[in-house]
Image: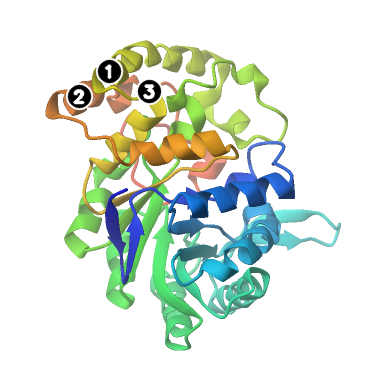
Amino acid sequence: MQARRIGPFTVGSVGLGCMNLSHAYGHPPSPEQARALLHAALDAGVTLFDTAALYGFGANESLVGPVLKAHRDRIVLASKCGMAGVRGDDGVVRRVIDGHPDTLRRNCEDSLQRLGTDVIDLYYLHRWDRRVPIEESVGEMSRLVEEGKVRALGLSEVGADALRRAHATHPIAALQSEYSLWSRNAELGTLQACAELGIAYVAFSPLGRAFLTGALQDVGSLVQGDIRTAMPRFAPEAYARNLQLLAPMHAIAEQASCTLAELAIAWVLHQGGHVVALPGTTHVEHLHEDLRGGAVRLDAAVLAALDELFQPERIAGDRYALAAQREVDTEKYAFESA
C-alpha cells in the first residue's frame, strides 16, 4: 500500500472507517465479529483507524479503543467532536451538533476515557456548528493540542472558505468529507484548497455506501435504521436510474483487471497525492478487497472513461436529504436541491 501524509503522520493510502461496526447501517455485527475485523485490519497493515463520539453514541470508541491500545505506536487513531448523542428529559438519546468550546472539551475528555488513551492522534470537528464561529471552535481544539490531549486537528464536511479560516487559526492536518465517483462535490473547491494548504483530504464513503461495489442491487432490502433509506439517491426510482451506470463501470473494471470496489478506491486515490481513502466494512473479505484497491494503477484512458461515466449531473438524487444537507457546509452543484 502507498504511504501518504496526514499532518505529522505517515499512513497507508487506505484506512478503515469504524462507524458501521456500531452505527448507521442497520444491524451492526456482534462485538466479537467487530473485534475480529479490527484485528484483521491490523494484520493487513492498516495504519489509520477512524471513529467518533457519535458512532453508537460512544459505543464505537469503547469498542475500538481496547483493540487498538496495544498497537498505538504503529497506527494513527482518529476521532471526532462536536456531534454526539445527548440524552433528553424523556430518556431518548438524540444527535446534537454543538461546537461551543466547553462542549468540545467535554467531548474530548469523554472520548479519551472511552478509548482508554491519554491522547487522540487526529481529532476532527465532526460538524461545524454555525452558531459558533469556526475560529472559536478550532481555537478551543488547539488548546487541547497544547495540553497534549490531541496531536493534530481535522475538520469534517466544511467548504473551502471555512477550511481556510480554520487553518489560519490553527494548522489543519486533514479534511474528511465524502468523495467518490458518485459524490464529487470535493472538486468544487475543497480538494484544491487542501492541496494548496498541505492538508490531507480523507475521503469517506469512497465506495458510495456500497453502490459502487455492485453488491446492493435492491434498496428494498435495506433494514430499518439504515441511514441510506433517508438519502435521496437511494430512493427506489433514483436508485434504479443509478444502477444503469454499473454495467459500463463493469466494462471499465475488466479493462483495468480489477473489481468494482478496487476500481472505485483506486479512482479516489488517483485524484491527488494528498488523498486518503477511508472505506468502512463489517466483512474481512471486503476489507482485503478495499486494501487491494490501494495498489491498483489506472492509466489515463481508464480515468477519462470513469470521469465521463460519472459526471455529477448523471447521478440521480442528492447526497443528503434537506435536513441533513443543512448540517454540512460542503459546496453543492447548481443542479442540486437547495
- Quick one: 105 or 334, which is closer to the camera? 105
- Quarter of the figure with residue 304: top left
Residue 95 appears anywhere in the view: yes
Looking at the image, do the residues carrying marks 2 and 1 touch, with CB atoms under 8 Å apart?
yes
**Marking on residue 315:** 3
Which element type, helix, strand or loop, lies under badge 3? loop
Disc 3, disc 1: CB below 8 Å? no
Q: Is residue 200 above or below residue 314?
A: below
Residue 321 visible from this viewpoint: no
**192 up-or-down from 119: above or below:** above
Q: Which residue is mark 1?
A: 252
User: What distance separates the C-alpha of mark 2 from that of mark 3?
Assistant: 19 Å
Residue 135 position, x and y percent, is 38, 74
Mark 1, other Cα within 10 Å: few <14 / some 14–19 / many ≥20: many
Between marks 2 and 3 in the image, the one whose residue lies nearer the viewer: 2
> Mark 3 and mark 1: span between their CA atoms?
18 Å
Tell me where residue 200 sits by quadrant: bottom left
For badge 2, the amino acid type reads: Val
Give the number of the disc on residue 179.
Answer: none
Q: Earlier in the sequence, mark 2 or mark 3?
A: 2
Q: Is residue 86 above or below residue 8?
A: above
Q: Residues within 10 Å of mark 2 (few under 14, many from 20)?
A: some
